[in-house]
Image (cartoon, helix red, strand yellow):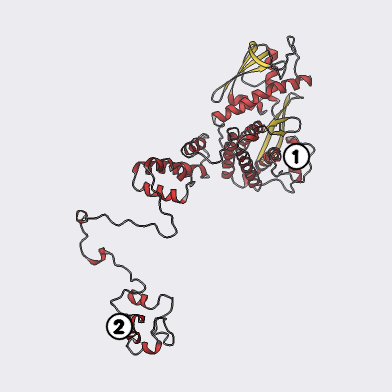
Amino acid sequence: MSGASGFEAYDEHGGHDEKEHPAENDGHGTSGADSGSGTDAGSSAGPRGPGGPGGPPGRDGRDPARPPRIPMPRASVEDTGRPLPALEDLDEPPPRVEAPAGRPAPLVLEHHVLKSLLGAWALAACSPEETAAVEEHLGECGGCADEALRLREAVGLLHRPDSLDLDPSLRTRVLEHCLDRRPPRIPVPDWADPYDAETARLDALLQDIGDAEWHAPVRLRWFDGENAKSADRRTTVAGVIAHLLSVDGLVAGALGLDDPLGDVAAEGRNPAARTEAYWRASHFPPTRSVRPLWREQTHALVRTVSFTGGTSGKLPVSYGEFELPLRDAMLDRAFECWVHAEDIAEAVDYPYEPPAPRHLHGMLDLAARMLPSVLAARRRAGLASPGRARHLVPAGEPGRSLRLEIEGLGGGEWLIPLDSPGAVGSAEHEVAHVALDGVEFCRLAAGHVSPREAAAGQAGDREAIRDVLYAAASLSRM
């Protein structure tokens, strides 16, 4: 059925035409008995009739002078064969189209305000009213439309599964640009940024690998300080993620979140014992199903420290043999996430870049600050020489020091006290100088490079240099 008859066959209540159902009444004073006679019984009944007073009835008993209750389809001017009016003949602009029902009317905002909302719009973080205002403005302003397109493409790169070859700092730059325009209501603390970034990069790598690659063999390596040699433990890609999940659980427990081990008993609180307990509790070797558990835990950690407003940075996190404040524990977890992401990338033959320079600097600073305590522990265990010139230094006083120079992006210089972890590094008491590349030093601290094989420039007390390099390697663990 087409044309006008298709609309006339139904009244506004969804009922069929009176001719098809003569026994029904349409509710407007026309009965089925009158419909077949060709006359409108309601035409003389005043305003109750469908045609109204004084009008001749139409084919269906309605007055053709009145508009139909269901509008007829409108013909386009192009279909009439008549020429279109010239633009200069239009005295008035076309009427403004009102926002459809259910959609908020756009806000009236100034240009600089709309431009500042483009970053939030690209991330779908605007309110419905702001979104309507921005999208209407993009149809009128070419400059803002170009910038919006660039931002939307950049945001799309953050979520594409084939975007692993990007500069690792791209995510940070895009987010900083957006957050500069519209600061977040609940910002992530600066000391949690490296963990947030490194877990996101590793998750992107995991999204790209196939099912079979989750079972690719991976060798976890660390430096055995007691035997002065490298140690390793063989597992799979999925096993590495289970390891990260288990050790991140130490931070989760300190924040009052669920421990991924649950009721599983571990022989100790140290990372190795927790990992072995998690692996033993699995009925089958870990598969890609461990990824959602790890990813949700990382998100929960970042959300929780963000909601505390950064005030939880001093909360102690126990690693069994030692403790770290939460702000340092998050840096430690970011460092291990990067190191094991490189292990996974090597296993699946995929390139992986170091962290952004400012994140790398934070990891280097943590390692440098931990060196005096590790050096003292090795000396108590008889693994480091006491030194002929060693002397006790009261806490807070300057003592013999080694200058650690880290070259490259994210590098810097640190004065490492040699005789006491409570002493203060002093340039006046400097006895040795070591220079390493930043990534080389991190691989030394991860146990991937032996202290004897580390490419380091050295000057000064050889014994002190050896002790510091071995202490850096002793920072590594399973």
Residue 279 visible here: yes
Considering only order in the chain, which callout, 2 or 1, is on the residue closer to the N terminus? 2
Q: Left or right of 317: which side holds 110? A: left
Mark 1 Cα-neighbour bin, 10 Å: few <14, some 14–19, many ≥20? some
The residue type indicated by label 1 comes to Glu
Provide residue 30's location: percent of width, then percent of height: 38, 84
Depth check: 362 or 93 in front? 93
Disc 2 is placed on an element classified as loop
Instruction: Locate residue 146: give its quadrant.
Output: top left
Mark 2 sits on what residue?
Answer: 57
Mark 1 sits on what residue?
Answer: 276
Depth check: 61 or 216 in front? 61
- What whole-number distance in Å separates the C-alpha atoms at marks 1 and 2? 90 Å
Depth check: 166 or 142 in front? 142
Residue 1 visible here: no
In the image, farthest residue toward the front: 46
